[in-house]
Image (cartoon, rainbow, N blue to C red):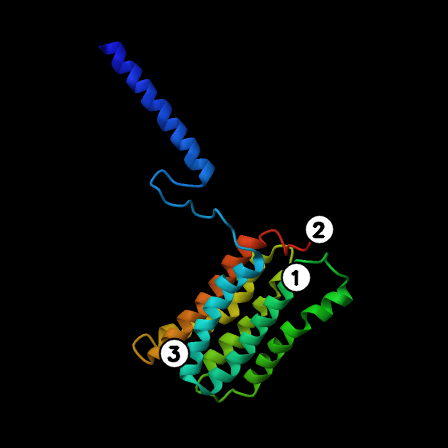
Amino acid sequence: MEKKLDLIVTRLENVCKRLEALEQKMGMKSGGGIMSGTTKKGPVEGYEEMVLGPVNKLKELSDKIGGDVQTCFDFMQKSFLAEKEFIEKAIKIQKPKDEDLQKMVNPIFEHVGKASNFKEKSRRSQYWNEISSIADGLSVVSWFLYEKPLSTLKELAGGGTFWANKIIKDEKEGDQNRFQWAKQYNAVMLGLQGYVKEYHITGFKWKK
């Protein structure tokens, strides 16, 4: 009887091993769910989801506030959209010479400059903090120029998140539109950092 039980246990163990091997081959967890990360999205799709997704939500909040916030955010959105187009082209080519690279990135930094100029003209705006968040933080779009983009990106984001955090502190019990706007602004910065960490942690991935 004892030998029969041992034989049954052995057979069950063998069956379990075969099932585990099959689950791993099919990319399944033992609980029946799909393993996370089985299909990693490409860098363009990843940018759309992790960066432009939060940017689109910030647009809704900017439109809700309107005025100077809406105007300045337009520069921010256009800069991020231009960066997406840059990524689409750049991942298909080898890193170009500096002169050609400059031409590729001009559409991105054109809007960075416009945001900075708008800030200089808006010192009396009631939305100075929001405008400063955008203008002082938009340099984050230059992350792809650095050998260590993630650490540099975190430093570049500091100028904008300083103002966003000030809004969060000042408007916690006040204007909820501004409060939610600032929280979403920080979500954009975190989304970009997450994207760079996922796809370009050791530097921008040009075609080899």
- Identity of the residue furthest to the left in this view: 1
Judge left or right: residue 180 versus residue 131.
Answer: left
Q: Amino acid at mark 3?
A: Arg
Find residue 145 and name its label: 1
**SS class, disc 3:** helix
For image coordinates 48% across by 71% down, the residue present is 55
The residue lying toward the viewer, choosing from 109 and 19, is 19
| Residue position marked by numbered label 2 in the rendering | 208
| Residue 10 picture location, percent across and down | 33, 18
In this figure, which residue is indicated by the disc labeled 3?
178
Mark 3 Cα-neighbour bin, 10 Å: few <14, some 14–19, many ≥20: many
Q: Alpha-carbon distance for marks 2 and 1?
A: 17 Å
Which residue sits at x=58%, y=73%?
79
* Mark closest to the chain's N terminus, 2 or 1: 1
Give the answer, above or below, for where 157 lies relative to 2: below
If you read the primary sequence from the N terminus, does the residue marked by circle 3 or circle 1 appear first?
Answer: 1
Disc sitting over residue 64 in the figure: none
Contact between labelled residues 3 and 2, with CB atoms less than 8 Å apart: no
